[in-house]
Image (cartoon, coloured by chain):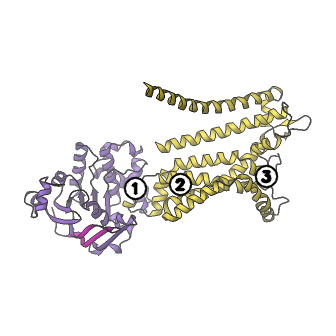
Chain colours: A yellow, B purple
Amino acid sequence: MNRKWTETVIEAAIRLSGFLLIAFVFLIFLFLLKDSLSLFRVYPFFDFIAGTKWLPISEPPSFGIVPLVMGSFMVTAGAIAICVPIGVAAALYIAEIAPGFLKTILKSLIEVLASIPSVVLGFIGIVWLGPFVKNLFHLRTGMCGLTGVFLLAFMALPTIITISEDALASVPRMYKEAAYGLGATKWQALWRIVLPAASSGIMAAIMLGIGRVIGETMVVMMVTGNAPVIPTSLLQPLRTLTATIAGEMGEAVSGSDHYYALFAVGLVLFIITFILNFTAERFLRRTRR
Amino acid sequence: MVEQDAIIKTLDLNCFYDELQVLRNINLEIYRNEILGIIGPANSGKTTFLRALNRLNSLNINYRQQGVIRFEGQDATQIPDSVLRRKIGIIFAMPQVLPITIYENVAYGPRVHGVKDGQRIDALVMESLQKAYLWDEVKDRLQTSATKLSGGQQQRLCIARTLAVEPDVILYDEPCSGLDPISTARVEDAMQQLSQQYTQILVTNNTKQAARVSHRTAFFLMGELVEVDNTQVLYTNPSDKRTDDYLTGKFG
C-alpha cells in the first residue's frame, strides 16, 4: 500500500516537471505577444514587419524590422555556407575515416570548442579577425558582416559536427558491408550509401546550427558594426535582431513604444527559432524511425 | 551437374582474429556451377571461410590470414578488392536491403562499377529480378522503398542485387536463418535455378537445408575441415565419425 503511494507521488512529480516545461514555453510566448500587441495598438503591424527603416529615437520614430531581419538573414546564410561543408566533412572524417585514438582526441577537442564563451570569441573578433578582414578587403572598418560570419560559423561547427557524427555513426554497419560486398570502394560506399542514409540527421544538425547562429547575440553585437541599415553586402556593417534587443533594451524607457517594439522583435526571433527547432525535430524523428 | 573444374581453390588457409585462430589449414576446391553446402556447429569458422573468399574479413583490422586462395587459377591477392567482390558476391544472414527504392537497390551495383547507360541498367534490373524469382511480385512497384518488402522478398532482392553485377560465384551466409518456411522454399528454388549459371556456396546451420539444396557438402568443426563429399554420400555414409555424430544430433 505504502509502495503504491510512493509510485503515485513520483509519477506526479515527473508529470509536473514535464508540464512545467510546456507551461514555460507557452508563458514566454504569451508575454512576448502581450507586450508586442501594446506596440501594434499605436504602430501599424504592416509598417513594423515591412518597414525599411529602424529609427527608434527619431521623431516620429520608425520601427521597420526589415534591416534587422536582413542583417540576421545575411549573417546566418553566410555562416551556414561556411560551416555546413566543413562541419559535415569533419563529421565524415571522424565517423568513418579517423583511426580510433584520433577520433577520441578530435571528439574531445570539439567539446572544448563548444565550451568557449561567445564573449571571448567576440574579443578575438575585435582585436584580431576584424583588423584582418579590414586589411584583406581594404575596408574602412573591419567591424562588418563578414567578421561576424566567420565567428558564427566557428560557433556553429561543434553543433553540426557532433550531431552529424552521431547520425553517421548510427548508420547500420550492414549497409556498408552490403555496398562493399557488391564491390563498391570506400568512397562510393560513403557517398552513395552512408551519407544519404544519414541525411535526415545531418539536416537536423544543420537546422540546429542555424538556430544557434540566429540566436547568438554577444558575438554579433561586438563585431558586426551595429548599423541598422539594409545591408547590400557582407562587407558593410550591419545589425541583427538579437543585437538590437541587447543593445537598445538598456536605454529604452520602460513602457514606451520603443520598449514594446523590442518585445515585438523578440517575438519575431522566437517564432523563427521555434520553426527551426520544430523542423529539426521532425528530421531527427525521421532518422530514428 | 558437377564439372570437376575448380573455380576457387584454397591451399593451407589459416585465419586469425588477433591471436585466436579460427580456421586451420583449409584445403578445399570449389567446382564450377556446383552448390557447395558448408555445415557445422556455431564457431566452426564457416562464416569466416566465406568472407575470406571475397575478402570482406579484411574490413576487420584485427584479421590476419595465411595461405593461398586461387580464383580462376590466379592468386586472389593479385585481384583488386572491387573486382574480386564483384565476381564473388555475397548474401548475408539478415537481408541487407539499402534504404532506397527496389529499383535503386538493384541498380546500385552496376552504377558503382561505372554502368551509366539507363537502358542497360533497366535491362539488368529486370533480368536480375527475374532470375531471383522476384520480378512478378515487384514489377509494379519498383519505385517504392525496398524496406517495405517482406523478409523473403528482401532476401531475394539481395540475390537480385548481387546478380546485377554479373558475378561468377555467389556466397550465402545462412541466407534463410531469418525466414519462414515458405520464404525459405522460394529462396532455395531460386538457388536451384541459378546453379545453371553460377557457382554457389551455402553456409547454413540447418543441415536439412544443405541436404536439400547442395550438390556437395563440407563439414567444418572447430576451424577444421573434417570432410567434404557428395551430399548423398556425406549424409548417408560419412567417413569421419564426428560428421556422423553431428548429423545424428549427438552434439552441436
- Say which residue label 2 marks: A165
Q: Nearer the viewer, residue A223 or A84?
A: A223
Q: Please identify the quarter of the rendering in which residue A83 is found.
A: bottom right
Q: Nearer the viewer, residue A140 or A260?
A: A260
The mark lying in front, picked from 1 and 3, is: 3
Q: Which residues are magenta?
A: B1-26
User: Is A241 located above or below residue A190 in the figure?
Assistant: above
- Whether the magenta-drawn stretch holds residue B4 is answered as yes
- Element carrying mark 1: helix
**Which residue occupies the extreme right position in the image?**
A59
Circle 2 Cα neighbour tier, 10 Å, few/some/many (<14 / 14–19 / ≥20): many
Q: Is residue B83 left or right of residue A243?
A: left
- Say which residue label 1 marks: B121
- Say which residue label 3 marks: A222
Circle 1 Cα neighbour tier, 10 Å, few/some/many (<14 / 14–19 / ≥20): many
Q: Residue at x 46, y 55 (%)?
A: A193
Q: Residue at x 66, y 56 (%)?
A: A82
The amino acid type of the residue labelled 2 equals Glu
